[in-house]
Amino acid sequence: QVQLVESGGGLVQAGGSLRLSCAASGGTFSNYAMGWFRQAPGKEREFVAAISSFGHRTYSVASVKGRFTISRANAQNTLYLQMNSLKPDDTAVYYCAAVDGRSGGLTTRVSGYDYWGQGTQVTVSS
């Protein structure tokens, strides 16, 4: 079973950047496909980006394409989300999630992931 801990959130002005990290422990990190999700107040948790177990495949939602980049460092058991050109609409709690990725597939569904971190707050001011 893998444990996930996010970090790197904070308050930033519109147009600024943040890099989120997700540290994994308790499992073989390279066995897992990883995803980033976010949840704004009063809204459902939504998919942001996903990456395959060895990083060969990525997918992100249209609203963040060209601004956010998902990556991973398997040797450091760490997942990243580089967020540039941030907008107030990006304000949310950001969660990382993991699922057995040895089949090679990626999923955008919340129900498709088995392990979740506790979240990190990102606030973008206008």
Image (spheres, helix red, strand yellow):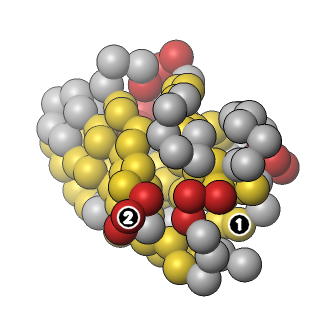
* Between 97 and 42, the one nearer to me in the picture: 97
Q: Is residue 17 visible?
A: yes
Compared with residue 72, is residue 74 higher up or lower down, i.e. above or below?
Answer: below
Position of residue 2 in the picture relative to residue 64 (left or right): right
Residue appearing at x 73%, y 48% in the figure = 102
Disc number for residue 115: 1
Residue appearing at x 42%, y 33% in the figure = 89
Q: Looking at the image, is mark 2 or mark 1 nearer the viewer?
A: 2
Residue appearing at x 65%, y 58% in the figure = 31
Labels 2 and 1: the sequence-earlier one = 2
* Between 112 and 52, the one nearer to me in the picture: 52
Residue lying farthest right? Answer: 111
| Amino acid type at mark 2 | Ala
* Residue 59 % position (x, y): 55, 26
The secondary structure type at the circle numbered 1 is strand
Compared with residue 49, is residue 4 higher up or lower down, i.e. above or below?
Answer: below
Residue wearing tag 2? 75
| Amino acid type at mark 1 | Tyr
Compared with residue 27, is residue 114 higher up or lower down, i.e. above or below?
Answer: above
Q: Residues within 10 Å of mark 1 (few under 14, many from 20)?
A: some
